Structure formats: structure tokens, C-alpha cells
Amino acid sequence: MIVDDEPGVRALLHDTLSIAGYETVEAIDGMSALTLLRTNKPALMIIDINMPLMDGFELVERLRKNNDQTPVLMLTAREDKSDVARGLKIGADDYVIKPFGIEELVLRIKAILRRSTKSTQIPATLTCGPITIDNEQHLVTFSGEEVELSPTEYRLLQILVEKKGRVLTKKFLLEEVWGITFESESTVTDTYISYLRKKLHRDGFEGIKTIRGVGFQIQEQQ
């Protein structure tokens, strides 16, 4: 589903995705998109941030509050990192800044779709220091206290804890968490690591480490 108030952008995305083998439906703003979702269940939504009536941020927030986990790729003409961070924090899977390259856009779409359909065998319970992940209940606790995480934060923490003590490269995390298998300068990994630290670095625990020039690891103790 393409959600953008600019006819030219919608036409470009429709043509591009059609050539790539995807069927599309289009909405001119967030309200129209919500109406379309009553009769359409897209595999992915491409949502522009700047739209009338309901902008992209509000649309994504409504989707996630309604427990709609449809993957979202956000389009933005803004280069302000706070806008990008906000989009990721509320549940978007990735973003592309306008003007964008068609080839990169298609690769990112394929990566998100690949990630959303990927299934892996993960133990029912994972632990690291005061952190416990109950995968059957989809629940994270810190010293017994529940910690609220977004779906992407949860997946990133899963990978870190499942491979605790190991240094995981940004490339590995981009592929495992976001499904990005091509060379990317995306800072999305750093952004989500910072989110996890804000929620889990407390009571003397600072187990999520940055290995400069390589990636990240989680340790039982400091």
C-alpha cells in the first residue's frame, strides 16, 4: 500500500513496484489508508511523513496501537535525525529520504518483506544478568519488572541475548533484525541500541557494549 499525498510520487512508486512484480493500492493520506485497510491486507505499507489530515507519524502510531504489525517503510523529505528516530521508535521498520534511488527503494522493500516472513527457532526463555526474555509470552523483564519494548526493540534484544558474549557486527544485526542484506550506511542499529540502553541500563547494569569499529555485544556483567 502506497500512502502519499503527491500524485507524482504515487505514480512513480506504482510503476516501479509493478515492474518489480508487486501489486499496489494507493491512499492519498492517513485517513484514506485506514479506510483501505478495512478491505485490504497489504504485505507492506510505504508511508510518507508529510501529509494533510493525518500525517505518517500518526498513521503508524494508530496502526501499532491497533496491534497492526504490517511492515512500514517511511518516506521523508526531512533530514532531521529526530524525525527519523521518531518514525523508528513508533514502529516503522525502515525509512528512505527523498529524493530516493529506485534501485535502493526496491532493495529495501525486498529486505523488509524477507525479514517479515523469516522464521527462526528461538529458545522459550533467554537470560542475561537481570534481563529475562520469555518468548512464549513475548515478555521482557528486568529483575522481575516488566519492560515495555517495541517489536523491533524486542527482536534486537533477542538476538543480542541469544548470542550473549559474542561481538555482533552491524552488518549481521541489520540482516537478522531488519533483513537488510545489502551494503547500507543506515544508523538504525545505533538508534535502537540507544533505545535499549535507555530502558535496560539501570541499577548498575550496563551490559550492552559498543565495540568500536565492529558492532555490539551484551554481557552478563559490566
Image (cartoon, rainbow, N blue to C red):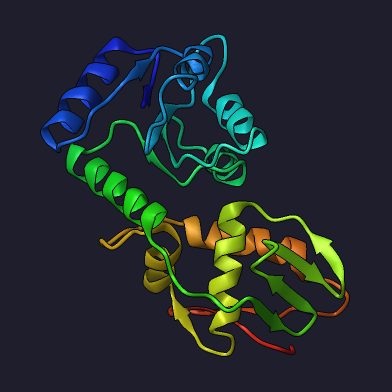
State whether residue 28 is above or below residue 216.
above
| Residue at 23% in and 29% down | 23
Q: Where in the figure is residue 217, as x and y percent of width and height?
A: 56, 81
| Residue at 73% in and 66% down | 140
Viewer-proximal residue, 173 or 211?
A: 173
| Residue at 27% in and 36% down | 100
How many discs mark residues in the rendered view? 0
Task: Answer with left or right where residue 87 lies relative to residue 36.
Answer: right
Viewer-proximal residue, 181 or 125?
A: 125
Tell me, yes or no, if residue 15 can be seen here.
yes
Viewer-proximal residue, 186 or 145?
A: 145
Quarter of the picture holding the N terminus: top left
Q: Where in the figure is residue 6, as x and y percent of width and height?
A: 34, 13
Viewer-proximal residue, 29 or 115?
A: 115
Tell me, yes or no, if residue 76 can be seen here.
no
Task: Answer with left or right where residue 116 lies relative to residue 192.
Answer: left
Q: Quadrant of residue 145?
A: bottom right
Task: Answer with left or right where residue 66 lies relative to residue 156.
Answer: right
- Looking at the image, the residue that sits furthest to the left is 19
| Residue at 60% in and 64% down | 193
Quarter of the picture holding the C terminus: bottom right
Q: Where in the figure is residue 127, as x and y percent of width and height?
A: 70, 82
Q: Where in the figure is residue 88, as x and y percent of width and height?
A: 55, 45
